């Protein structure tokens, strides 16, 4: 039996086996993280478009209370959700370390903090203003739900949790959808252009719960982010930019909702 098993193993070239492992590994990582989120967002979108009334009359709520009226239990759930969402990032770090390269190979390290911070801030400034205008236009045209970035109670931990949630989103998305996925697709001999499009479509897919505007807006952002990653070889600036964008959305909404006329509320 051992000889027979050895013969079967020898019949597969090492390169083919390696490609199969990488393909399966990539699919599993996505199935445990943002690939699953894409399917969930698609189901949510179908539910929204088949529901009576327009999309802008419906709301997509982020950072909602997990235990209304019980702030300490709510805090525990919020922290659990943030920590558990980062498990796929830890898995990616493990897989890259096992590969012999580590997270430094995708530029998620502390070797260039000034580079990451300055370029990330510039990206956030450019995309942030454009993104707000696009969202308001898409919602006005009926292509988007009303996005409610936060619906947490007014407790002492509200803003720290919103900031941690923003950073968690940034790390999860940029590490997996840009750094990890583009590396693996390159190893699977995808052309750079095709890989960038695939990464961007994935980013758009898990924002479909916001509506068609959410899909196309994030697809465009994905194209820009993937292109910049190809130029710089670092996800660090993208994590900084994404963190600032989400902090601005979450905290800004908490401070301005109901106080300015141009900001839609549910």
Image (cartoon, helix red, strand yellow):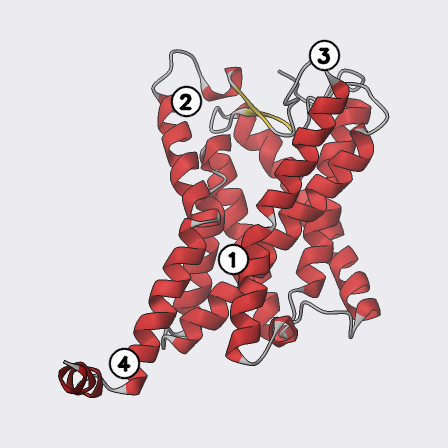
Crowd band around label 2 with a 10 angstrom C-alpha radius: few (<14), some (14–19), many (20+): many
- Give the quarter of the image for residue 66: top right
Q: Nearer the viewer, residue 172 or 48?
A: 172
Q: Nearer the viewer, residue 145 or 9?
A: 9
Q: Work out whether 61 lies above or below 23.
A: above
Instruction: Give the mark nearer the N terminus: 1 vs 3.
Output: 3
User: Tag 1, which secondary structure?
Assistant: helix
Q: State yes or no: discs 4 and 1 in contact (Cβ < 8 Å).
A: no
Q: Which residue is mark 1?
A: 177
Q: Which residue is mark 4?
A: 16
Q: Nearer the viewer, residue 113 or 16?
A: 16
Instruction: Give x and y (percent) for residue 173.
Output: 57, 52
Q: Residue at x 75, y 47 (%)?
A: 244
Q: Which residue is mark 2?
A: 48
Crowd band around label 1 with a 10 angstrom C-alpha radius: few (<14), some (14–19), many (20+): many
Comparing labels 1 and 3, the label whose residue is closer to the camera: 3
- Residue 239 visible in the picture: yes
User: Tag 3, which secondary structure?
Assistant: loop
Instruction: Give the mark nearer the N terminus: 2 vs 1.
Output: 2
Comparing labels 4 and 2, the label whose residue is closer to the camera: 4
Q: Is residue 261 left or right of residue 190?
A: right
Q: State yes or no: discs 2 and 3 in contact (Cβ < 8 Å).
A: no
Q: Which residue is mark 3?
A: 69
The quadrant of the rendering that contains the N terminus is bottom left
């Amino acid at each position: 039996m051992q000889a027979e098993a050895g013969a079967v193993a020898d019949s597969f070239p090492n390169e083919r086996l390696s490609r199969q492992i990488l393909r399966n590994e990539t699919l599993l990582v996505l199935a445990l993280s943002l690939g699953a989120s894409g399917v969930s967002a698609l189901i949510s979108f179908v539910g929204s478009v088949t529901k009576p009334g327009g999309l802008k009359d419906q709301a997509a709520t982020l950072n909602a209370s997990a235990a209304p009226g019980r702030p300490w239990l709510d805090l525990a759930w919020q922290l659990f959700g943030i920590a558990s969402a980062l498990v796929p990032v830890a898995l990616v770090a493990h897989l890259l370390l096992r590969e012999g390269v580590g997270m430094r190979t995708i530029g998620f390290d502390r070797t260039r903090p000034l580079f990451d911070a300055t370029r990330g801030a510039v990206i956030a400034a450019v995309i942030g203003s454009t993104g707000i205008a696009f969202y308001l236009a898409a919602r006005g045209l009926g292509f988007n739900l009303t996005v409610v970035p936060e619906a947490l109670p007014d407790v002492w931990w509200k803003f720290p949790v919103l900031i941690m949630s923003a950073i968690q989103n940034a790390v999860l998305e940029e590490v997996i959808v840009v750094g990890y996925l583009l590396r693996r697709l390159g190893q699977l001999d995808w052309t750079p252009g095709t890989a960038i499009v695939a990464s961007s479509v994935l980013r758009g897919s898990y924002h479909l719960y916001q509506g068609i505007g959410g899909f196309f807006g994030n697809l465009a952002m994905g194209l820009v982010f993937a292109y910049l990653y190809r130029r710089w070889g670092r996800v660090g600036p993208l994590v900084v930019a994404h963190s600032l964008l989400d902090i601005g959305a979450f905290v800004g909404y908490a401070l301005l909702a109901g106080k300015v006329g141009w900001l839609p509320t549910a």
